[in-house]
Amino acid sequence: MDLMLYDTFTNSKKKFEPIDPNNVRMYVCGPTVYDYAHVGNARPVIVFDILFRLLQKIYGSKNVTYVRNITDVDDKIIHAANDQNEDIGILTEKTINYFHDDAKYIGALKPTFEPRATEHIPEMIELIEKLISKEFAYVADGNVLFSSNKFKEYGKLSGKNLDEMVAGSRVGVESYKKEESDFVLWKPSKEDEPSWKSPWGDGRPGWHIECSAMSEKLLGENFDIHGGGQDLIFPHHENEIAQSECANNNKFANYWVHNGFVTVEGNKMSKSDGNFVTVNELKDSFQGEVIRLTMISTHYRQPLNWTKDNLNESKKTLDKWYTFLSNFNGDELKDANNDNGIMETLLDDMNTPKAITVLHQKFKDCQSGDKGLVSNFLYSANILGLLNEKPSEWLSWKKENLNINTAQVELLIAQRNEARSNKNFDDADRIRNELDKMGVILEDQGGETTWKVK
RNA sequence: GGCCACGUGGCGGAAUGGUUACGCAGAGGACUGCAAAUCCUUGUAUACCGGUUCGAUUCCGGUCGUGGCCUCCA
């Protein structure tokens, strides 16, 4: 069965055919590093992690190159550094570490390459020079601008056309721009701003050029998949296409894959609206796989409404699965390797919600305890990056996180069981209520009493 | 104003030209001293109006509504 992907360029599902099956190449726009990532930022990390895993399964893990860049020079970073009175390099380094911690927490594999903008300034300058020499770009007041109307196909990804855009635009036009839709490739740096020497004076790159330069360096002029959030379609990806295709006279990316937004009460989650939740702040209450399952419970192109109820539902599901798996030791579940259904759902434009349905079915099927079926269930979940923890560790996670006095709980349980064995059920129930108030729930099973945290 | 996406039960969320998944919650049952957990059973939905069709939730047109992009944004 073929991999089908929804391509923004044609607004339709297309069969995926790699340029080179021995080197399938994907570029995804990564974070701008000035602050903790919120769950909206985390969505593409998970979505394209799923796609990365899928491509590795199909083409072999050695035959897929996944590039996710880090934007470490940008106005927002400069502002944040100024606000916090912090050195830019220290701020970006710190934020990159946060990001890596978060990515690991939500179970994302490391990309093959994670290039940083500041480490590719020479490549960007080279690309800009190429665009100037081909007269797609011009210099004005120390800025270098891309001349949008020189690229006849400008707007082809987002379905916009220049005349309409100008008519409806709310942007103030900078005086040095020939056309309102021209965009900056290089701009002069002010005092105290990061700055690099260039043929056009000391300055720094515009936002879009880094992706064109770095993708070309690591993946070539023409590569398979370019991904990112839907809000990057215009202008970011449009501008990347303009830069790269004009510079190289070659097709840029063959497939454009965009994830939908995370919303909060129906509105897009974003830093500027202040309606965001960071991944980091969820770590106290939810394990990474809970976040991951919540995220992939909705198809990647649909809006995803972020609620605590959804998180709790995912948690409940994973608790149930892990509880069941805790009856087995890991070694006896190693032999399964055919997935029976999960791959089919993913091949159809990464239908993760349907994959989860398949997982529920498999879970039901393996209630008999048949080790082959249990192994298959576990293997299937692993494809989605789920159930990678040891059940015992998963189930004790909350206890360790909540400062519950384990010794006291065990003592009360012993007292209750003493009362129960004397058929003193009033006392037994009183103790259980007491524990309940502490957030501890008891389960009497097979003559043993286990407990868990609410 | 232009462009794009979307409207499925109480909630989440797939799919489909003809019996509408699955999960959560709810209800009933088994189990339990009682619970919890687990298992079994179960009710409820395709925004509105037209059209095509033997038949549409699915295809087409329109209406209404929601969200997004057009400015930094995943």
Image: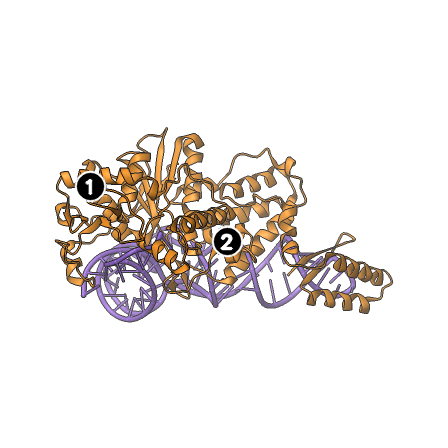
Chain colours: A orange, B purple
Residue holding disc 1: A199
- Three-letter code, disc 1: Pro
Q: Nearer the viewer, residue B7 or A172?
A: A172
Q: Nearer the viewer, residue A399 or B12?
A: A399
Furthest-front residue in view? Answer: A191
Residue holding disc 2: A291
Q: Is residue B50 above or below residue A215?
A: below
Query: What residue lies at 74% left-to-right and 59% top-to-bottom?
Result: A409
Q: Secondary structure at mark 2?
A: helix
Query: What residue lies at 43% left-to-right and 49% top-to-bottom?
Result: A90
Which corner quadrant holds the C terminus of chain A?
bottom right
User: Could you tell me residue A344's position as x and y percent?
Assistant: 44, 41
User: Could you tell me residue A174's position as x and y percent?
Assistant: 17, 58
Q: Is residue A206 above or below residue A223?
A: below
State which chain disc 1 sits on: A
- Three-letter code, disc 2: Ile
**Dividing the picture into quarters, in which one does residue B68 lie?**
bottom left
Furthest-right residue in view? Answer: A422
Q: Secondary structure at mark 1?
A: loop
